Image (tube, rainbow, N blue to C red):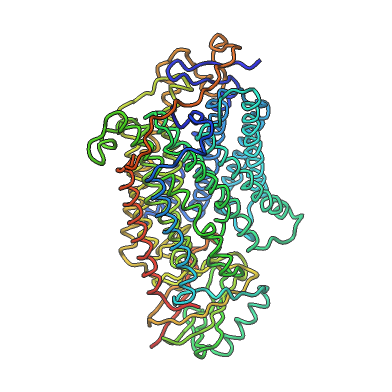
Amino acid sequence: MTSFMPPAERIWWKVPVGREEIVWILIALTWCLIMFFMMPYWHIYGKQNLSNEAYQTTPAKYGAKVQEGIDQHKVGEEAGVPIVHPPAGSDVYMLGRLWQWWPILELEKDKTYRLHLSSMDWQHGFSVQPININMQVVPGYEMVLTVTPDQAGEYGVVCNEYCGIGHHTMVGKIYVKE
Amino acid sequence: MAQFRTCPDTGLYFHKSAESLIKANAVAAAVALLVAGVLGLLVVLTRWQAVHLLPADQFYMALTAHGIDALIFWIIFFEMAVLYVASSVLLRSRLATPFWGWVQFVLMLVGAIMTNWAIFQGNSSVMMTSYAPMQAAPHFYLGLILFAVGALIGCFVFFGTLVVAKQEKTYDGSIPLVTFGAVTAAIIAVFTIASGAIILVPTFFWSIGYISHIDAEMYRIVWWGMGHSSQQINVAAHVAIWYLIAGLVFGARPMSEKVSRSAYLLYILFLQLACAHHILVDPGVSAEWKVFNTSYAMYLAVLASMIHGLTVPGSIEVAQRAKGFNNGLFEWLRKAPWDNPVFSSMFISLVTFGFLGGITGVVMGTEQINLIIHNTIYVPAHFHATVVTGTTMAFMGVTFFLIPVLFRRQMILPGLAKLQPYIFGGGMTILILFMLGAGTLGVSRRHWDMDFTGAALGFDYPGMAYTLMGIGAFGGVIGVVGGAAFLLITVGSLLFGKKLEPSAGLLQSFGVPLAASCYTDERPAILPRAAAAEGHHGSSFEAPGTFVLALVLLVTFVVYYFINWKYLASVWQLS
């Protein structure tokens, strides 16, 4: 008379279901639907959504765009990495490669930027800390995030997709100025 | 002529060939668990920043092997044993084509050894996911392919056995619920392995130079068609084991065959969509695709798990109340055999899978919330709750049952066995909770050094992140002690446990049949249908205690879910 024997009733699918199972299924289904509709709701009313804007690219093409951004808007250098201060509202380019985020970005608080990300080689993880925003950076794809940093400060960009022996040294920077 | 023996203690029938295969697969699984456990210890002792045991190259090698040995080799070897139990043993049927069963075992064994060999040679430290374009040695992929082919053959031996049982009329009525759950697992396994073949075969050819380019994003999407779905095999399999243990320990019957089986059907229909969980912050996929797939089409597979979450403990409650444990809401639970490791393992598995694994999985699989969690150590915390305290503890529980029944040995160290589920479950729960916390603070997964030694530009995690990682790692060490206790008890029992009649020697523990006299050519009696239940279904609830527990789960779920939306709302605006 157990779960590992054939059902007692030959036509088991016609046995009525107990009340608490029905009540629970209705509660659970309601909750599932609420969770489902939270996602489209947030697309309309929430402020943290991904644009899903992305382009196929190549390391050479993307690298040239990053270099162009550095040539136009470089304002300094830190530990050998150029610091770029792009105009508010503009397209901003950053790349990941073994084992660097390149260049350092200097952004203005409450201004909106179109941040482009791609990888020159393997996959990387773009993890802005301590604010904790995490994106997958994939070679051959250029992802565009429209981002509005609303807290000033110094942010680390940790690589959080394993990328070989120097993975733990792959740290970049974003400065958000008042 | 098929030969069977009866277990004198339980009345279960064992087909000689099936019995040998179950033992061989279970022993191979235990070896994989041993390797995975040792590596797991090395991994936690490295991520515990104050200890920081291994150098970087060895850490990544150990982490790669830990993931593959635990998540693939331990679990899938054990699942092969589960499939043969659920078909041949539970249906009292001979196993279809024992020859192909051994092909399954040998291919999986060769594959497992080959992949481990590739990893420990040192040039395949690519993590379990082996994301292209990072490349491993060719035999890393080839080993996985052989292992998968073996597993696929095992699934077809299982399906063949169902056909044999049906044709030879070894049972009356429909297949039992537990077998139905195993069918679900095997069906999911078939399309999981198909996904694996679609991506791993070209990747293998790429690694030997026959294919020039593997698209990194395509790799991710198709690989996760295997990687996530294979975890859904585990869910289907360990839920089947929950039902099995409820039946074995309490004589519990499903509250409703229709409800439980429909829930399994939802798994088959919707679980496969979950590859999207891993692609939520990737370039090149649309929001519509993410929302539909990450939610298993409106969370219908989550609904299925919530149903099992009620019906499994509910069936135990009904059985306990029928025995007279009727006082209050929870006497049935208080008077459960908490010192029986078969039950306590199963119940810890049920609770941790629901409260820790299930809730965190749904939260981080929410399209937008994923961006504050992706690739942080929150992720391994989640899946340790699903596959370690969830799947692994369910498998450990049923192993304690199988030692005397299948291996014919009395369990050694019964006192330690009583404690083992609490040590293992408790330690792993500490690991999980504190890694969840560290992930919320942004600590990265798969990362050797949270101090970023040698980096040109630095970043300092808050001190709390170090504290949480340290406590979590301490929990991990306790978990390893619990895992070691499990292997000590099980392997020790096979070697030194008192022999039960009909007795088994050392070789028998590894798959050699028992003495010929144990078996007869006589066909087992036809497996009857369960006795009819006395009419319970009235206007009152049969399992009110379970219903209250389910509501506690729901409230926890709702609160935690909205806390994470609130946390998301605090980060930079993105559009």
Disc tally is 0
Please report the residue visible at 54 percent of the width from the left and 21 percent of the height from the top.
Answer: B14
Q: Quadrant of residue B217?
A: bottom right
Q: Could you tell me which quadrant the N terminus of chain B lies in?
A: top right
State the residue in front, B27 or A52: A52
The image shows residue B407 at horizontal and vertical percentages of: 48, 22
Q: Say if residue B123 shows up in the picture.
A: no
State the residue in front, B297 or B54: B297
Identify the residue at the far front of this view: B539
Left or right of B163 in this view: B127: left
Left or right of A14 in this view: B538: left
The image shows residue B431 at horizontal and vertical percentages of: 36, 50
Identify the residue at the far left of this view: B327
Q: Quadrant of residue A73?
A: bottom right
Please report the residue visible at 67 percent of the width from the left and 51 percent of the height from the top.
Answer: B200
Q: Say if residue B185 shows up in the picture.
A: yes
Identify the residue at the far top of this view: B517
Left or right of A59 in this view: B256: left
